[in-house]
Amino acid sequence: MPPPTQPPFDAARFSRDLLGWYDSHRRSLPWRERPSTYATVVSEFMLQQTQIKTALPYFDRWMVRFPSFSALAATSEEEVVKAWEGLGYYTRARNLRRLAIEVAAQGEPRDAAGWSNLPGIGPYTAAAIASIAFGERIACVDGNVVRILTRLTADGTSYPDSSRAAKAFTALANSLVPEQRPGDHNQAMMELGATVCHRHSPLCTVCPVLSYCAAGKSGDPGSYPRLAAKNYEKKTVDRLLVIQDGRILLHRAHTHAKRLADLHELPDFVAVGLTEPSPGLKLIATRKRAITRWQISERIWRATVADIRSEGLHWVELNQLDQITLSGPHRRWLSELLVEELALK
């Protein structure tokens, strides 16, 4: 059975209580304290797949370096990606620059439909920008909002993923958005999900809308939403750490690569023509990370190689590492490994 399209309570009272709480308890965030359409767009791009605490220092530096759509549009893609280094999912940075070029040339759209035609903008981001910056009465529905709505309605439907659940709850979410302050309502819902209505151990005793919440009143909010468990595929990637004459060997992804275009990483075995560890290699570290559906173990082998010539491979001076763009994990790993490796010299 699909979720209801109208709330089983007074929507106006719900919004009043939620906004009252938000006005008193909202976190002080730079895009809230110094609002602008550009700040809203930048924050929404940065917060896709990134926690607020991670994004905050990037946002502050970004706004100083690229203070407007026109400033960002006039900047090279290489410089934009370098400024994004460490936030991951670099397509977001490229799309943000492409969006800035279009907005600088054509002006800012005034509604979600217009924003959804721009690079990197999905339904959630379009609704966030349109409601916060232009007052459009439209709901933002992400994982936080799905969690709140399934608990408010005690919806026991099993959904294959959060995206499918978001589509199912869009009508209900829209019915809750008030005529006045729609952007604040959306931010209040996000704030509630992030600070009170946690996925695990929700803080029901301090929830401003507990009286409307069927799951909260029944004492079992943790059972919602009911989403299918993610199935991760495991794989192992072997990489080389080669340091020679004050230089390090790195692989730079092709300009048209889907995920890491123009970014540097430690070369994997494929890049140097290896299929398995050779006798001269020594395993010095194993690092694990998750990317989309993959759980990846990356094994790093120390090697001494006199001459390697292969497409995408480059020798980079160690004292120039700060000048190039590395993927976030590899920047962190190198900062650890180089201290150890150079100490052995």
Image (spheres, grey):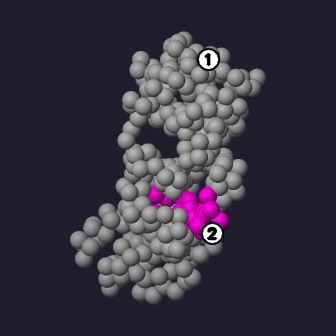
Q: Does the magenta stretch include residue 92?
A: yes
| Residue position for label 2 | 105
Q: Which of 119 and 176 is in front in this view?
A: 176
Q: What residue span does the magenta drawing correspond to? A: 84-108
Mark 2 secondary-structure assignment: helix
Q: Position of residue 58 (x, y in %)?
A: 40, 58
| N-term mark: 2 or 1 | 1
| Residue position for label 1 | 10
Q: Is residue 300 magenta?
A: no
Is 161 drawn above or below residue 133 in the view shown?
above
Q: Position of residue 233 (x, y in %)?
A: 60, 49
Residue 139 shows up from this direction: yes
Mark 1 secondary-structure assignment: loop
In which image quadrant can residue 180 be found?
A: top right
Is 216 drawn above or below residue 175 in the view shown?
above
Q: Which of 325 and 176 is in front in this view?
A: 176
**Quadrant in the picture for the N terminus:** top right
In percent of the image, x 58 and y 15: which residue is there? 214
Q: Which of 84 and 300 is in front in this view?
A: 84
